[in-house]
Image (tube, helix red, strand yellow):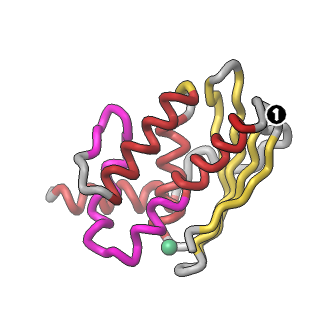
């Protein structure tokens, strides 16, 4: 199987069978993200204990790339310290926006999204979840670890 086909299959698998989907009642960070260009909308619920993102859940609707990417992201960040999550987000952004090579150990299935770079108009779909997560963590840190609610737009 060509790598491109394998990657397409990974994306469609996350779109059809999203991981970590569902609202969390007592999450520490609740952050919404929209990509008006495509109509993608997501919402993240992060559970943070002692500086570690112990759980990341989402809900949303929109194109397959946006929804698969956020499903992949929740898998790639859960169980990591906030610093590790920030590094993971930067690794993904570097791959999608700056032409860097993605690191499989850091990004997991996130590597499958690299091919989206061939379609510049869809890059915002792919980075929506990761940028939304980044904003949520920034607000959480800024608040000194309090419960925060925030929203992000790719526009
Ligand atoms: Zn989209």
* Range of magenta residues: 102-128
Residue 100, placed above or below residue 153: above
Residue at image location 23% in from the left, 46% down from the top: 101
Look at the magenta stretch and give its main secondary structure. helix
- Would the CB of label 1 be found within 8 Å of ligand 1? no
In this picture, residue 40 sits left or right of residue 8: right
For the C terminus, the quadrant is bottom right
In this picture, residue 4 sits left or right of residue 82: left
Residue 154, placed above or below residue 51: below
The residue under label 1 is 146
Residue at image location 25% in from the left, 49% down from the top: 100
Labels in figure, total:
1
Q: Quadrant of residue 141?
A: top right
For the N terminus, the quadrant is bottom left
Residue extending farthest to the front is 142
Residue at image location 32% in from the left, 66% down from the top: 116
Q: Is residue 115 magenta?
A: yes
Residue at image location 61% in from the left, 44% down from the top: 20
Residue extending farthest to the left is 2
Crowdedness near tag 1: few (<14), some (14–19) or many (≥20) residues, C-alpha within 10 Å = few
In this picture, residue 145 sits left or right of residue 6: right
Mark 1 secondary-structure assignment: loop
In this picture, residue 125 sits left or right of residue 114: right
Depth order, front residue of 74/121? 121
Q: Quadrant of residue 55?
A: top right
| Residue 73: image location, x then y, percent | 50, 46
| Residue 102: image location, x then y, percent | 28, 45
| Residue 77: image location, x then y, percent | 52, 36
| Residue 70: image location, x then y, percent | 53, 54
Q: Quadrant of residue 46?
A: top right
Q: Is residue 123 magenta?
A: yes
Residue 104, placed above or below residue 40: above
């Amino acid at each position: 199987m060509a790598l491109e086909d394998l990657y397409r299959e990974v994306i469609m698998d996350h779109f059809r069978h999203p991981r970590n989907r569902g609202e969390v009642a007592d999450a520490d960070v609740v952050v919404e993200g929209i990509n008006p260009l495509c109509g993608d909308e997501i919402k993240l619920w992060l559970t943070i204990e002692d500086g570690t993102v112990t759980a990341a859940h989402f809900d949303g609707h929109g194109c397959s790339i946006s929804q698969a990417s956020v499903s992949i992201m929740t898998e790639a960040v859960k169980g990591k310290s906030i610093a590790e999550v920030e590094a993971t987000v930067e690794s993904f952004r570097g791959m999608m926006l700056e032409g860097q090579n993605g690191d499989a150990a850091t990004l997991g299935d996130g590597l499958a999204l690299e091919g989206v770079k061939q379609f510049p108009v869809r890059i915002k779909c792919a980075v929506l979840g990761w940028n939304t997560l980044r904003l949520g963590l920034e607000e959480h840190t800024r608040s000194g670890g309090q419960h925060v609610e925030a929203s992000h737009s790719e526009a």
